[in-house]
Amino acid sequence: MLEKITNKETSIAVIGLGYVGLPLALEFARKFRVVGFDINAERVQMMTRSEDPSRELSASAFEGCDIHFTDQIDELSQCSFYVVAVPTPIDKHNTPDLRPLFGASRTVGKVLSEGDIVVYESTVYPGCTEEDCLPILEEESGLVAGTDFHYGYSPERINPGDAEHTVCTILKVVSGDTPASAEIIESVYASIITAGVYRASSVKVAEAAKVIENSQRDLNIAFMNELSMIFDRMDIDTKGVIEAAATKWNFLKFSPGLVGGHCIGVDPYYLTYKAQKIGYIPEVILSGRRINDGIPAFIAKRLIQLLVKSDFGLKDAKVLVRGITFKENVSDIRNSKVADLVNELESFGLTVDIVDPHADPHEVKEEYGIVLSDRPMGEYVATIVAVAHNEYTSHSPQELCDVVKNGGVFMDIKGIYDGAPQGYTYWRM
Ligand SMILES: NC(=O)c1ccc[n+]([C@@H]2O[C@H](COP(=O)([O-])OP(=O)(O)OC[C@H]3O[C@@H](n4cnc5c(N)ncnc54)[C@H](O)[C@@H]3O)[C@@H](O)[C@H]2O)c1
């Protein structure tokens, strides 16, 4: 198979061209012939014009790539190595929404031929590939998994907005249903991943490894958030505590804060869903999730307390929130906990203006019904720096408080600064 791919006698297909799929497809396309498939025709048109709809890659990333973008299923039939990288979100009950994954499996099943290989990259719970996706591939293709066609799982670990850790520079876990398929999958990925590949012992092991990476991070942050809520009551500065504790060689240094985005706050629910399905209540993982999901309400309550203490009436009071993306210096607003914070503040009757130099105002309006302001307007009783965009870290607290009434509150969620200007109340987690 590798020889045929290398000689361009066959193509690699990447299904789902978002944050994960597009960079991977382009890397493959520097060496091999690639068909990039996405159901979103508008996104396909943009990529055909060398534009990344996720705004992570510049036009130069498309240069020298042998890739054809399409939303037409029949154009996939020339491929024999399929990579599925569609979203795996959760619904409003925190249950996995597998519709994109099943849709992509139906697409691949329709064009699958004997001898082909299908690799899933989407983050799932252990068992999802074999128990839930394979039956769809088999039903659509009329072929038998493990004999007529083979499959594997290779999770993605990219970190949007991080120029150092990119597709090729992160060690990649791969797996296959048989030693022979694992060998092929390993060699295909090894030809583009400079950091090397690690072969997991089974597809389930690879699936589980991915989902625990993000669950561990979620739990570590939940611990810091819990500490922050305890120390806040005792008037102890949590950042100072963590810095002191981190002088011990085996202390794990994490920071408290909002846990949003499409990975850390979502993936643990895939694991807890599966655990509960097989009769185990994952108390530690779920309590970490509960703590992290409760942080917007905690911050909102603290701001109200500080405003009341500062003798500001809440009626007609305006608050300025800086940053709505799920993390610094990216435009991704999915699962933004800042949006939850805004809702909490508004539930107390406060008027909230939100600015963000990275977020797309149309996306924010569509996703959250929130209208972004293009700049601060008027005077505020408080400002909250919610996201550590470079545009904020490069400013002093004094500059950020220029629009805040004297005696107002300066909330520094990310612990970027070391205090507020004279006459203002400073608070951080
Ligand atoms: N974004 C990250 O940083 C990151 C990191 C590691 C792992 N992951 C995982 O990778 C997977 C993909 O995430 P993403 O952030 O790239 O998603 P995304 O939302 O950026 O992109 C998904 C793309 O898939 C397309 N799509 C949806 N359903 C489809 C279907 N049935 N057929 C074809 N295309 C379809 C969408 O139109 C979109 O272009 C998820 O499981 C995610 O958890 C993401």
Image: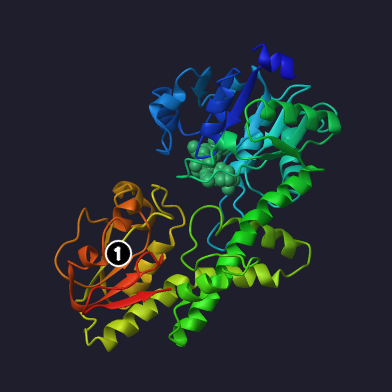
Mark 1 lies on residue? 321
Q: Is residue 102 visible?
A: yes
**Vertical side of 21 occupied by 73: above or below:** above
Q: Position of residue 61 (x, y in %)?
A: 45, 27
Looking at the figure, which quarter contains the N terminus?
A: top right
Q: Ligand 1 lies in which image quarter?
A: top right
Q: Position of residue 208 (x, y in %)?
A: 73, 52
**Vertical side of 80 occupied by 345: above or below:** below
Which residue is painted at 64% across and 35% down in the image? 195
Q: Position of residue 72 (x, y in %)?
A: 53, 24
Which residue is painted at 31% across and 76% down in the image? 426
Which residue is painted at 77% across and 47% down in the image? 204
Secondary element type, mark 1: strand
Q: Nearer the viewer, residue 170 or 295?
A: 170
Where, by quadrant of the figure, is residue 220 drawn? bottom right
Looking at the figure, which quarter contains the C terminus?
A: bottom left
Q: Nearer the viewer, residue 214 or 88?
A: 214
Q: What amino acid does circle 1 point to?
A: Val
Horizontal side of residue 96 vs 389, given as left or right: right
Where, by quadrant of the figure, is residue 401 drawn? bottom left
Q: Point out the residue furthest to the left here.
A: 378
Which residue is painted at 42% across and 48% down in the image? 332
Q: Is residue 143 visible?
A: no
Count numbered badges in the picture. 1
Q: How is the image coloured?
A: rainbow
Q: Position of residue 262 (x, y in %)?
A: 52, 52
